[in-house]
Image (cartoon, helix red, strand yellow):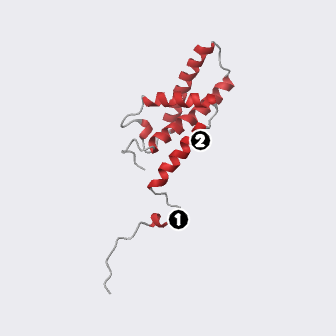
Amino acid sequence: MDFQKTNPLPFFMLHPEYIGTGTEKKAMKDFDYFQQTFPSKVKEYQQRIASIIDHMDYEGAMIYDEYPDRLGLETLASTITDMLLKEEQKEQQATCPVTQREDKKMMIQVLVCNEIYRRRHNGKREFFYY
């Protein structure tokens, strides 16, 4: 019997829960859908965060590091929080209580991480390594 020698598949591709190339697009589509269900104020923050991060979207940016630094992400979220709260204060001429500021800061940090995740996995950057 003459058998052709074939290259075996890597072990992870044989696993039933293997995520192939097509599922990444489905996951991002699902992720984008759920972002549309955010409350209106959170949507406003998300859109503003996306426009701010647009200015940081370049090759070699911190948001595309293989393992972004936690302190760097917290600093980025804190800076964006300050920007958003200053914009709100200009519109409303009111100050934000400290407890509300901390709650907003935590929410904005989650939104920043979501936006970075979306950009890293949306296929725009080919130089991102897993």
Splitting the image into 4 quarters, where does residue 64 fall?
Answer: top left
Could you say which disc has been placed on residue 34 in the image?
2
* Residue 88 x %, y %: 59, 19
> Which residue is at the front of the view, 92 or 70?
92
> Does residue 42 appear left or right of residue 68 in this picture?
right
- Quickly name the residue at label 1: 16
Residue under the image location 47 percent in, 27 percent down: 52
Dot 1: within a 10 Å radius of its alpha carbon, few (fewer than 14), some, or many (20 or more) residues?
A: few
Splitting the image into 4 quarters, where does residue 105 fall?
Answer: top right
Amino acid on which disc 1 is placed: Pro
Residue under the image location 65 percent in, 16 percent down: 95
* Residue 8 x %, y %: 38, 70
What distance separates the C-alpha of mark 2 from that of mark 1?
Answer: 26 Å
> Which residue is at the front of the view, 41 or 85?
41
Give the mark toward the camera: 2 or 1: 2
Q: Is residue 1 above or below residue 32?
A: below
| Number of marks in picture | 2
- Looking at the image, tell me whether mark 2 or mark 1 is earlier in sequence order: 1
Q: Is residue 118 above or below residue 102?
A: below
Q: Is residue 107 above or below residue 123?
A: above
Residue under the image location 41 percent in, 33 percent down: 57
* Residue 129 x %, y %: 40, 48
> Which residue is at the front of the view, 43 or 86?
43
> Which residue is at the front of the view, 97 or 93?
93
* Residue 76 x %, y %: 50, 30
Instruction: Find the residue positioned furthest to the top.
Output: 93
Amino acid on which disc 2 is placed: Phe
Residue under the image location 51 percent in, 37 percent down: 115
Dot 2: within a 10 Å radius of its alpha carbon, few (fewer than 14), some, or many (20 or more) residues?
A: few
**Could you say whether the residue bearing mark 2 is in a helix, strand or loop?**
helix
> Does residue 51 appear left or right of residue 106 in this picture?
left
